[in-house]
Image (tube, grey):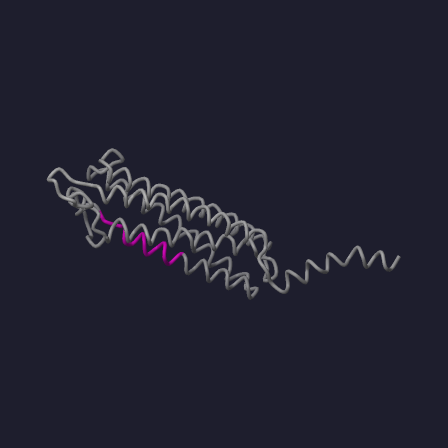
Amino acid sequence: MTADAHALTAPEHGVAEAHHTGGIGNPVLGMLLFITSEVMFFAGLFAAYFSIRAGYIDADGLHRWPPKEFAETLDPFRLTTAHGDLNLILPATIVLVVSSFTCQWGVWAIRRDDHRGFVRNFAVTLVLGVTFLLLQAYDYGVLFREGMTMGSGTFGTTYFTLTGFHGAHVFGGALMLAVVLYRGMAGQFSARHHDMVEATSLYWHFVDVVWILLFSILYLL
């Protein structure tokens, strides 16, 4: 009977020891595989963008990108647009970059079993993520008033496709943050059990890196 009891409990101890000694949990592994597929997705969008950009000729017969009618509007360092609207794309970028730091601080907090620090930093990250989405929505409204839409030639189509898909990913990341925050407030995570926190942070860092690339390509190059 003793031997049978030991046989029944041995696998359980093995799982606990494996978790204690480290390794990649299923949520983290699944997120890494998902991010790999998303990298290929955005790589296709970037390839299409550069292909369109390389072959673009404006009405004056010049290879000018972005088109001259939108160049001033898309200048991230201008405080206002031609119609007097605030240009908030640079502040939005700063907000998203800062959110990546607060997210990582939350991960480090739960690793050392600082539950309060984890909840606080993930709450701030969620607020910053939602703020970015609101600022992007405002920016879309400014662009519409400036006459730039999905129908504004190949540039308008590629611009709204790239930024729109990224915005959808940020929205998905915000939902993940909200779920993790809710579970964290319910006390479901600890220094030994926080794989979902790690997985969510990986995804959030991914959307942050993608935006940095988009900002550089669309506004600076």
Q: Which residues are magenta?
A: 86-99
Task: Specify whether 54 is left or right of 21.
Answer: left
Q: Nearer the viewer, residue 120 or 26?
A: 26
Identified at 46% across, 51% down, the residue is 203
Residue 90 part of the magenta-drawn span: yes
Dominant SS type (magenta): helix
Q: Position of residue 10 (x, y in %)?
A: 76, 59
Identified at 23% across, 49% down, the residue is 87
Residue 52 part of the magenta-drawn span: no
Q: Position of residue 90 (x, y in %)?
A: 27, 53
* Residue furthest left in the image: 60
* Residue furthest top in the image: 151
Q: Nearer the viewer, residue 173 or 40?
A: 40
Q: How many marks?
A: 0
Q: Quadrant of the N terminus?
A: bottom right
Task: Specify whether 217 is left or right of 125.
Answer: left
Q: Quadrant of residue 171?
A: top left
Identified at 48% across, 50% down, the residue is 177
Q: Nearer the viewer, residue 95 or 55?
A: 55
Does 204 sit above or below residue 68? below
Task: Specify whether 19 is left or right of 36.
Answer: right
Q: Position of residue 7 (x, y in %)?
A: 80, 57
Q: Position of residue 217 (x, y in %)?
A: 28, 51
Q: Quadrant of residue 113?
A: bottom right
Does 135 sit above or below residue 151? below
